[in-house]
Amino acid sequence: VDHLNISRELNRNPVFQVWLVLQNASTEEGELKFNDIEVSPAFSSHPVARFDLSIAVFEREEGITVGFEYSTDLFEEETIKRFAVHFEELVKASLKDPAYPVQTLPLLTAPEKEQLLIEWNDTKADYPENKTIVQLFEEQVEKTPDNIAVVYEDQNLSYKELNERANQLAHYLRSLGVGADTLVAIAVERSLEMIIGLLGILKAGGAYVPLDPEHPQERLQFMLEDTAAPLILTDTKAVDKLPVTFARLICLDEEWETIKDLPSFNLPSITLPHHLAYVIYTSGSTGKPKGVLISQRSFLNHMLWMKAKHVFSDSDKVLQRTTYTFDASVWELFMPVISGSQLVLCPAEMVKDPESLLTYIKKSRASILQLVPSIFKAMLNNAKLKNLQRVTKVFLGGEPLLKEQVQIFASNLNHKIINLYGPTEASIDVTSYSYNPEDSGVSVPIGRPISNTQMYILDQNQSPVPIGVSGEIYIGGVG
């Protein structure tokens, strides 16, 4: 070798090329011989990857060398490093037991397993497991009895008034046999009676089953038969929309003359953490609707996590727009009244119309709201977007959230934006993520598990998948 010339080409990626200028080489029988030089295969970088991802394998006396070549448009260096580590684990496992089924061979290293199973699921948080949402509400009543608790159009109730009316209804329900785990259906229009009814059922010890009077008769009939609810709280506007049933109908607006004469003091609690709080039915898009039974413990854990994580104060006005037959409504309804905030019930005709909704948000002076991304997107193109100036927090969930949508919103208004995720079966939300403008990617992540909740991404064999690999979500814990 006469000399070694190393040149560095400044392309999109730094690339090193080595040129060997050979002299004194000889040939014997057509083979090129290098004097005192050993030649072996080597890996090199190229300005452009020949394939999206390719693996080169060289056999040597001391073993096998493996190299990865990849397109930097598709893969990051950290991803390829993980691929290499997982490939090594796969090879080790297959050599250890060559007869082991390939699809069950492990990919994860011990530190990765620790991270995925233990570190990222270390969500333990203390909370008063022996309490209920009703008790938290009653404690708040003691603190702020004269503050406005709930508003609907031009009507409102103070904390003291809301508590007394819910107590009167609870006494009435107790007299009709409602106790722990009794399922009580409720089918009312949006009104003050809606929140009185929900609290009254819980105070009596029962679990509420929300019915939307606008839903098809077949669905309502199925839910009533499936739960065998002995009682239905309703009103004169909704009663004619209900199917024929053996359940006793309690028309709140007609029977209130009787109910208002009952005691207004708090009832002794008969509710324990394992008792039911509510039953909400899934849409039934994959078959028959399923009634999901949520315990007081699960309900309480979520509410106390949310209260601590996202901070609700007595100066907040929380807009309640989600229909109460969806579990996303649960925190909208109860978080305000256990936090000293004001619950603002959005009129039904404004719930789904972005322009009307923007008008009402300004009129009500709401500071906290929850939206599905599709409604959120429709709002972004509306001239009334400035009506959200008083809003401090926007919770989004129920659909994938694109980063470009949030960026438009964030550039116009300085709000905290939180993405929530959770199936009905898992007590409202199980993950939370606060949007960060510096985030990469097309969509906003669903975040990390909430308090006392575990999340695992598993393959078809229920083994944890490596970071960046698709799998199914498994949820565990108090929720």
Image: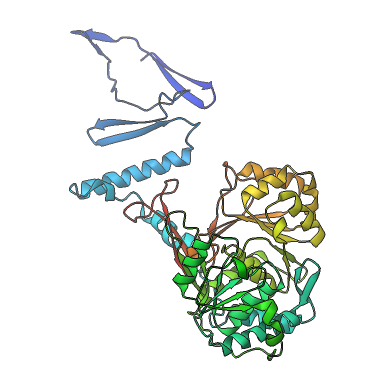
Quadrant location of the N terminus in the rendered image: top left
The x, y position of residue 308, in whole percent, is: 64, 69
Res 336 quadrant in image:
bottom right
9 sits left or right of 39 in the view: right
Give coordinates of residue 30: x percent, y percent.
Answer: 21, 8
Task: Looking at the picture, tell me which residue is in the foreground, 327 or 287.
Answer: 287
Q: Can see residue 146? A: yes
Residue at point 51% right, 79% down?
230
Residue 227 to residue 281: above or below: below
Viewer-side residue, 417 vs 360: 360
Residue 353, relative to residue 364: is it above or below? Answer: above
Where 103 falls versus 127 (above or below)? above
- Asked whether 396 or 42 is in front, the reply is 396
Q: Is residue 453 visible?
A: no
- Name the residue nearer the viewer: 73 or 269: 269
Residue 469: percent from left, percent from top: 42, 46
| Picture residue at 52% right of the left edge, 20% below the top | 9
Residue shown at 67% from the left, 49% from the top: 376
Q: Can you give x and y, in whole percent of width and height, for residue 148 in the image?
A: 78, 74
Q: How many marks?
A: 0
Q: Is residue 357 left or right of residue 296?
A: right
> Residue 151's image quarter?
bottom right
